[in-house]
Image: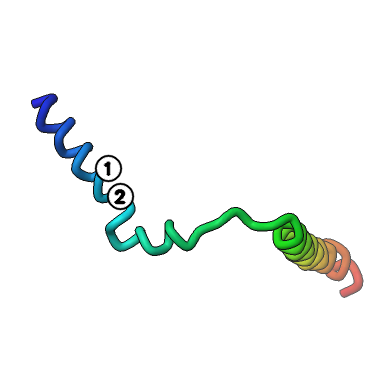
Amino acid sequence: MVYELQDEFESKARGFGKGKYGRILKMARTPSKEEYVKTLYITGLGIVAIGAVGFAIWWIMTCLPTYF
């Protein structure tokens, strides 16, 4: 039982870079510092934008009903 599991695991591990994801893994690389900073900047802007929209909705729902 244990030997069968071990053989199955080893056969999957041997073919890890040759399957449908092998090409992607071969093309993958670590981003440069410039790419990382741009990604961080864009992600941060997205988080701030979503937070601002949420705050605006909250403000409209709490403050505007008192005017009517």
Q: In this orientation, which residue lies closer to the viewer: 41 or 35? A: 35
Residue 13 seen in the current view = yes
Q: Residues within 10 Å of mark 1 (few under 14, many from 20)?
A: few
Left or right side of 26 for 35: right
Question: For the residue marked with disc 1, what is the amino acid?
Answer: Ala
Give the percent coordinates (x, y) of residue 34: 76, 60
The residue depicted at 81 percent of the width and 64 percent of the height is 52
Q: How many dots with numbers?
A: 2
Question: For the residue marked with disc 2, what is the amino acid?
Answer: Phe
Residue 61 seen in the current view = no
Looking at the rendering, in which quadrant would you find the N terminus? top left
Q: Is residue 13 above or below residue 46?
A: above
Give the percent coordinates (x, y) of residue 32: 69, 57
Please give the residue where the numbered disc 2 appears in the rendered image.
Answer: 16
Give the percent coordinates (x, y) of residue 68: 87, 74
Circle 2 SS class:
loop
Identify the image's colour scheme: rainbow, by chain, secondary structure or one colour. Answer: rainbow
Disc 1 vs disc 2: Cβ atoms closer than 8 Å?
A: yes
Q: Is residue 16 above or below residue 65?
A: above
The residue depicted at 35 percent of the width and 60 percent of the height is 21
Q: Is residue 18 above or below residue 2?
A: below
Q: Quadrant of residue 38?
A: bottom right
Give the percent coordinates (x, y) of residue 43: 72, 61
Q: Residue furthest top?
A: 2
Q: Residues within 10 Å of mark 2 (few under 14, many from 20)?
A: few
Please give the residue where the numbered disc 1 appears in the rendered image.
Answer: 13
